[in-house]
Image: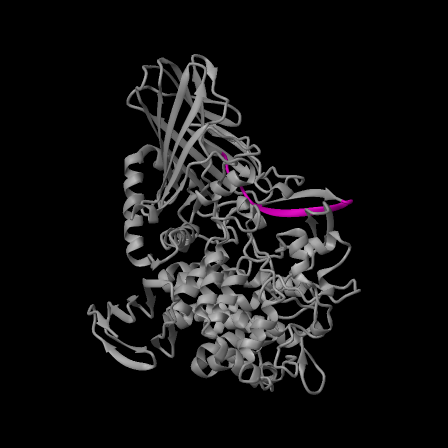
């Protein structure tokens, strides 16, 4: 059904609601992201045109409280889509009063139909936008103008170089001028970022069969303009080919843009885009039949946005990763976080070339991670909580609480578990692809250097190893009560994942002895460290009480309880209860209240069996009902302040067999950006982490599709309200098509292989569907 492939808006939104829709209507191709703002809009309270290029950042400096604050942001490039219209010499400045915006995800295009009221009648503007996923520097649009009266119409299509980074309201107090225009000529605006010194070119050519366009050049803009007499209901058809390139990815960036303008047409770019999306959906669609009428299109929206954030035709050419907001806005300053943990496995199962490219970004920044550790007087490699261009730490030391409008210390950089997320992503890629070349090309050095960090950081008390000065995924807890020093001791998630990571290191020593020995020599990782890794993998401290509840970190159980029901009655939305408590002159550090899953996060990563084995490996015993007890304990204290929290708890629910509870949580998560459940954050860009997480939970946890010990394992637990599920994934070079319907499992593989269904092994012949 067409409606399951389209996101359609018919309203005329204002403020953050409009910004949020523009983020969701973004087009992209892994190289660039083009926010879905109307052509006749500039930055204002209701609209924010944006054009971003993967990997392009710039630093600015602003004085705050007598301190120089340096921010590194993705660059909002000159706007090549600006449209101005004059009717009988009068410029149209009134807003539209009718609108239909249609994002067609199957065709990869955005169409917008707007009606503007004017004195003599109405102006009708229809626009169609596309990006080229193959020749990824190119984008194009078509404009169809008409009136319900006759008039002289003046049209200007502009490359606007008067652009600043102004997407995020709380960032606007900072210096936000990221580039300067250096030249305008030959339909191309050239510029240079002010600190990172990246040269770029943005070009555009406008054509029409009904009118001739002339071009004017100004200091910071290029204007294609024409004037035509339009009869009532006559359509003026305008086509515009645009291109952007930088010397960050290619020294011949100017030539790339010139060729795109000289050789490209709207029709060619449109067809390239159409064919690409047609091919993509054949292998990437996730089909669900359920009682929720919106869920199919929203699942496709998640897939669509992740493919626009990174894809195999662009990212292997780029030195870039995917930020928490993709290329759809400036939230989190475009930085790369641990969120990759939620989408790298998804990319690996759909398009492993893309996942590999994202891992290369991390591997290339291993020297920076080593410098980060050295700056903190640590050993080995310490990946930054927030990474941008070169891999140094970009997390701020202060942050603004919008409820009090005051600045407070920010200890989020103490989430050292980001290094474990990098290791997990490399592990995930190697397990799902069977490709160890990534380990040989730097991945093993990442594991060794991050292991060295943990091994040297840990303190031994004669019985156990302890890790202090860290934070877990729950960002509400940065420090102990009544202390000025940030950091916590023995965060359970961190310690368990360190034990797992060290165990993997020791397994690789046996599996790849020659490669391992070579990497050890390169990383100065000697036998003493190997022996310590073995010991620490069995002696890291995890605290567990008499009921079998794993303590989130040492002394967490001593914190005060907080009545969340009372706070919800008073404030309504409490997903950022940390800010509420600060406004009340209290601190979340004093209470057992969590932003998101923390102690149970390892279950999402590796499953309850591996977590239980790790806990036992560390010398602890758990009761049989430990998983339910831990879920219930922490769920009662969690406000889901992060969009990835519900998918993690859904994964835990499925492990417990509570699949319908899991589905309820996942439905909210799937709608995170579409419903903007965090009260306006989608305005700053979509959330790539939750999009990857919900797709992983659907295919890995509900469908029970996991690649274990070299075989595809299938053991589904589907919600009662699902009638059908079907999708395709790729493991170790074999592409599988799986369909779940009427208590039957259908599997088809493009190569012969052995699979396990409900624990029983079956032989599959190539391209022959088998039912179970």
- Residue 238 lies left or right of residue 495; in this view the side is left
- Residue 80 lies left or right of residue 416; in this view the side is left
Q: Quadrant of residue 354?
A: bottom left
Q: Is residue 75 above or below residue 603?
A: above
Q: Give the number of callouts.
A: 0
Q: Name the residue at 49% across, 57% down.
A: 669
Q: Which segment did they paint magenta?
A: 65-78
Q: Is residue 123 above or below residue 701?
A: above
Q: Is residue 66 above or below residue 384?
A: above
Q: Give the percent coordinates (x, y) of residue 471.
A: 65, 66
- Residue 402 lies left or right of residue 312; in this view the side is right
Q: Give the percent coordinates (x, y) of residue 20.
A: 51, 43
Q: Quadrant of the C terminus?
A: bottom left
Residue 397, can we see it?
no
Q: Quadrant of residue 259?
A: top left
Tell me how the rendering is colored: one colour
Q: Give the percent coordinates (x, y) of residue 540.
A: 63, 81
Q: Give the percent coordinates (x, y) of residue 123.
A: 40, 22
> In front here: 562 or 65?
562
**Magenta span includes 420:** no
**Magenta span includes 67:** yes
Q: Is residue 146 above or below residue 295?
A: above
> In front here: 650 or 618?
650
Residue 326, can we see it?
yes
């Amino acid at each position: 059904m067409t409606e399951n492939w389209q996101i359609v808006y018919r309203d005329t939104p204002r403020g953050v609601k409009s910004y949020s829709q523009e983020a969701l209507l973004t087009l992209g191709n892994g190289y660039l992201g083009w926010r879905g703002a109307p052509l006749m809009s500039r930055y204002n309270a209701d609209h924010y045109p944006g054009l971003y290029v993967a990997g392009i950042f710039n630093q600015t400096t602003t004085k705050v409280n007598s301190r120089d604050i340096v921010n590194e942001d993705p660059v909002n490039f000159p706007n090549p889509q600006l449209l101005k219209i004059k009717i009988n010499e009068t410029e149209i400045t009134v807003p539209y009063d009718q609108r239909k915006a249609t994002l067609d995800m199957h065709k990869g295009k955005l169409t917008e139909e707007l009606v503007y009221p004017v004195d003599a009648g109405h102006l009708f503007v229809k626009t169609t936008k596309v990006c080229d996923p193959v020749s990824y520097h190119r984008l194009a649009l078509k404009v169809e103008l008409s009136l319900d009266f006759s008039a002289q119409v003046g049209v200007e299509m502009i490359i606007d170089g008067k652009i600043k980074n102004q997407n995020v309201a709380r960032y606007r107090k900072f210096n936000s001028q990221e580039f300067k225009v250096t030249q305008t000529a030959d339909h191309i605006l050239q510029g240079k970022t002010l600190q990172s010194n990246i040269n770029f070119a943005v070009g555009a050519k406008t054509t029409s069969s009904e009118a001739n366009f002339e071009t004017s050049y100004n200091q910071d803009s290029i204007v294609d303009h024409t004037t035509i007499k339009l009869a009532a209901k006559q359509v003026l058809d305008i086509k515009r080919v645009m291109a952007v390139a930088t010397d960050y990815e290619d020294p011949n960036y100017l030539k790339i843009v010139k060729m795109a303008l000289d050789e490209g047409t709207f029709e060619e770019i449109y067809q390239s885009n159409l064919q690409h999306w047609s091919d993509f959906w054949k292998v990437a669609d996730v089909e669900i039949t359920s009682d929720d009428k919106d869920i199919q299109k929203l699942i496709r929206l998640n897939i669509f946005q992740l493919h626009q954030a990174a894809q195999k035709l662009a990212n292997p050419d780029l030195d870039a990763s995917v930020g928490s907001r993709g290329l759809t806005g400036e939230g989190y300053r475009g930085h790369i976080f641990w969120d990759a943990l939620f989408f790298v496995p998804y990319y690996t199962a759909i398009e492993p070339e893309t996942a590999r490219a994202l891992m290369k970004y991390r591997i290339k920044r291993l020297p920076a991670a080593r410098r980060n550790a050295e700056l903190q007087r640590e050993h080995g490699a310490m990946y930054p909580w927030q990474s941008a261009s070169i891999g140094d730490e970009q997390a701020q030391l202060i942050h603004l609480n919008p409820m009090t409008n005051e600045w407070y210390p920010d200890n989020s950089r103490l989430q050292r578990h980001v290094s474990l997320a990098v290791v997990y992503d490399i592990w995930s890629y190697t397990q799902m692809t069977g490709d160890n070349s990534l380990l040989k090309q730097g991945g093993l050095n990442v594991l060794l250097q991050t292991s060295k960090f943990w091994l040297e950081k840990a303190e031994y008390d004669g019985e156990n190893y302890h890790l202090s000065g860290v934070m877990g995924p729950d960002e509400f807890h940065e420090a102990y009560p009544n202390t000025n020093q940030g950091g916590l001791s023995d965060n359970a998630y961190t310690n368990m994942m360190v034990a797992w990571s060290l165990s993997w290191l020791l397994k690789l020593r046996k599996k790849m002895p020659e490669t391992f020995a070579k990497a050890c020599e390169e990383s100065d990782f000697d036998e003493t460290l190997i022996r310590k890794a073995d010991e620490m993998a069995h002696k890291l401290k995890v605290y567990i009480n008499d009921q079998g509840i794993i303590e989130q970190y040492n002394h967490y159980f001593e914190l005060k309880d907080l009545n969340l029901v009372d706070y919800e009655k008073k404030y309504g939305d409490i997903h950022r209860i940390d800010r509420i408590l600060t406004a009340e002159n209290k601190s979340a550090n004093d209470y057992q209240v969590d932003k998101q899953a923390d102690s149970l996060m390892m279950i999402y990563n590796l499953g309850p069996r591996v977590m239980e084995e790790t806990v036992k490996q560390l010398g602890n015993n758990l009761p049989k009902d430990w998983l339910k007890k831990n879920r219930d304990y922490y769920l009662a204290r969690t406000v889901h302040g992060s969009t990835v929290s519900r998918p993690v708890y859904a994964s835990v629910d499925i492990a417990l067999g509570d699949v319908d509870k899991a589905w309820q949580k996942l439905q909210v998560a799937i709608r995170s950006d579409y419903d903007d459940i965090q009260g306006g954050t989608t305005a700053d860009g979509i959330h790539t982490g939750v999009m990857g997480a919900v797709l992983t939970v659907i295919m890995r946890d509900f469908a029970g599709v996991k690649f274990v010990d070299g075989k595809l394992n299938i053991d589904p637990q589907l919600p009662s309200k699902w009638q059908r599920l079907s999708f395709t994934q790729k493991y170790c070079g074999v592409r599988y098509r799986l369909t779940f319907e009427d208590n039957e499992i259908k599997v088809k593989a493009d190569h012969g292989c052995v699979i396990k269904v409900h624990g029983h092994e079956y032989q599959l012949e190539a391209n022959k569907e088998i039912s179970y």
